[in-house]
Amino acid sequence: MGVRRKYIRTTIEQLLESYDIKTAPVDVEKLASLVGANVQYEPTEDKLSGFILKDLQKQTVLIGVNKNHPKNRQRFTIAHELGHLLLHKKGRIHVDHKFQINLRDEHSSTGVSEEEKEANLFSAELLMPAKFISNDLAEIEAFDLFDDEYLKKLADKYQVSIQALTFRLAYLNYIQL
Ligand SMILES: [Zn+2]
């Protein structure tokens, strides 16, 4: 199938537009509640980032986040789980009482499966929307992208790690890694 890059970009653009989100940082927890998912923070073992539980009968969704992780990582996790929720609707029509569980562990950050890659891309697109980045970068000189202080400032604005921002800038072809 391959990662649906265009579809993911469009899905997020529509999402941001319908909830009138125009500036960073994107409030992913609020967005989760707007699409009907409840976010809960629980301390858990380090290798677990979060999970999504769908109660197909009650039609409720719970996103669990590892409270022990740094704030930026928690935001990434929420966005990642939202990706699963909005992109991977497999099983939606099952009418059993069981929760459908989708655990996310450290391996997913390297993108082991297509679905994990898609959820990770969704997360990057949501936390650092291409248009927002383009607007911010329009105001600066290309030279600044190699300025660590500027990168730190930009990462703080989006509430993401510098590493996540750097990958994103490379993905969007602003820099080469
Ligand atoms: Zn995942």
Image (spheres, rainbow, N blue to C red):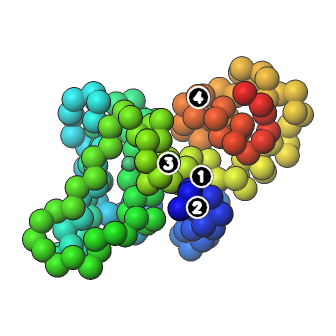
Residue at the disc numbered 1? 125
Counting residues from the N terminus, which is met first, the one under dot 3 or under dot 2? 2
Q: Where is residue 20 in the image (x, y as percent from the top left)?
A: 59, 68
Q: Are marks 4 and 2 in contact (CB under 8 Å)?
A: no
Locate residue 23: give its quadrant: bottom right
Q: In this view, does 49 lie to the left or right of 34?
A: left
Q: Do the residues labelled 4 and 1 touch (CB within 8 Å)?
A: no
C-alpha distance separating marks 2 and 1: 12 Å
What amino acid type is highlighted by mark number 2?
Answer: Arg
Counting residues from the N terminus, which is met first, the one under dot 4 or under dot 2? 2
Label 2 beta carbon less than 8 Å to ligand 1: no
Label 4: element kind: helix
Q: Where is residue 53 in the image (x, y as percent from the top left)?
A: 23, 58
Which residue is most to the front? 1
Q: Is residue 104 left or right of residue 164?
A: left
Label 1: element kind: helix
| Residue 4, numbered label | 2
| Residue at 53%, 62% in the rendered image | 1
Counting residues from the N terminus, which is met first, the one under dot 3 or under dot 1? 3
What amino acid type is highlighted by mark number 1?
Answer: Glu
